Every structure is written in structure tokens, then in C-alpha cells.
Amino acid sequence: MPIAIIWISFYIGLFVYFKRRERGEKAIGFFIKFLVPKKFKHIFKKFSKSLYKDFPKVKDLLFPYLINFVSLIIYYCSIYVLAIALNINLDIFTFILFCPVINAISFLPISPGSIGVREITVAYLLYYLFGISIAQGVALSLGIFIIVGLPTMLLGFIFSVLASKDTNNKKIRNFSIEKYLKRTENKKMI
């Protein structure tokens, strides 16, 4: 629980710091000056200038954060219930700390859907940190994929098929990476 409070405080602090334009541009300028290669500096300078045009107000962020918080609680509780069903007896706060590590590793583009990477990670962490059997760890990881990941992928597939069948939407129908790259190169030349 203290780690979650530290993370939340860190994010709130970042938001408050970058809320004032002068401080934010100074921090981004420092980042650009020392860490960004010369050929990319102009892109980051444009980003720095445009960031504060679209910077959201705090009241505009409350509802999305609330929705995200509720969805994370549902996500963690579903994993916790699945773990109880698999006879993995850990408290829910352990899962609250454990799940972000699983999610971060799942984003590695090693295999489609991170199948295999996630299973090894969950099995390894549960076995070495908590003494849970590797079979239970793999079962939990596959359960997480089936309960959380698979429905999301199916919905994304359905929405992409429906969007591509929309004959009125010429942007989706005629989109190609080659055309996009040519357009962006032409804009750079101008």
C-alpha cells in the first residue's frame, strides 16, 4: 500500500510541476538539450511548444481517472478471484503490486499477445517470491489472458472489421502506410 501512495504522489507531483508552463518548458528544454540527438531536436522542440496548447484542465481529467481507477479495481479483483479459484492464497495487496509488473512485461513485443513471456514471468515470480507451484503460476497467467486479454482482442477485432466495412469512411478504406509516409516526407520538404 505505501508503494501505491508513493506512485500516486509522484504522478500528482509531476502533473503539478508541469502544469506551470515556465517550469515545464524548462524541464523539457533540459531533456532536449542533453538527451535528444541533434537530428531529432526540432521535433521535440515542436512538441514542447504544442504541449501546453492541449494541456488538459484538472476537472477534465477527473472523470477519465475515475473510470480508469474503477477498471483497475475490477481487473485486480478478477485476477484475485481467479487466484483464489486456483488455490493461490495471497492477499489482494500483493496482487495490486504484482499485476503492474506482469502488465509491464506483457508489453514487450516478443511474441503475439505476449503468450509465453507472461506465463514464464508469472510462474517465476510466484514460485521464487511466494513458493507457489509453477503449474499454478502458468494456470493463473493463462486465466488472466483468457479472462482479460482475449475479450479485449475480440472486441478490437470486431470493431476493426466493422470500421473497415464502413463504406462511407474513405480514410479507413484508402489508408496505407506508404501513402502516409509519402505525405509526411512531402510536408517535411515544404
Image (cartoon, rainbow, N blue to C red):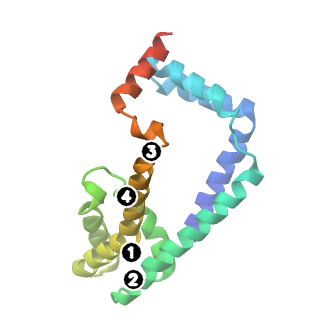
The single residue placed furthest to the front in the displayed view is 167
Work out whether residue 153 or residue 85 is closer to the camera in this orientation and state it: 153
Seen in the picture, residue 159 relative to 55 is either above or below; the reply is below
Q: Is residue 22 in view? A: yes
Earlier in the chain: of badge 3 and badge 1, it is 1
Q: Residues within 10 Å of mark 4 (few under 14, many from 20)?
A: few
Q: Nearer the viewer, mark 4 or mark 3?
A: 3
Q: Nearer the viewer, residue 130 or 140?
A: 140
Circle 4 is placed at which residue position?
Answer: 157
Looking at the image, do the residues carrying marks 4 and 3 touch, with CB atoms under 8 Å apart? no
The residue beneath circle 2 is 82
Q: What amino acid type should be assigned to the residue bearing mark 3? A: Thr
Tell me if 111 is positioned left or right of 73 in this view: left
Element under disc 1? helix
Residue pictured at 47% horizontal, 25% vertical: 36
Q: Residues within 10 Å of mark 1 (few under 14, many from 20)?
A: some
Earlier residue among tags 4 and 3: 4
* Residue 125 picture quarter: bottom left
Q: Nearer the viewer, residue 107 or 11?
A: 107
Mark 1 in CB contact with mark 2 (< 8 angstroms): yes
Vertically, is 160 above or below 144? above
Q: Quadrant of the N terminus?
A: bottom right
Task: Say if mark 3 contacts mark 1, CB within 8 Å.
Answer: no
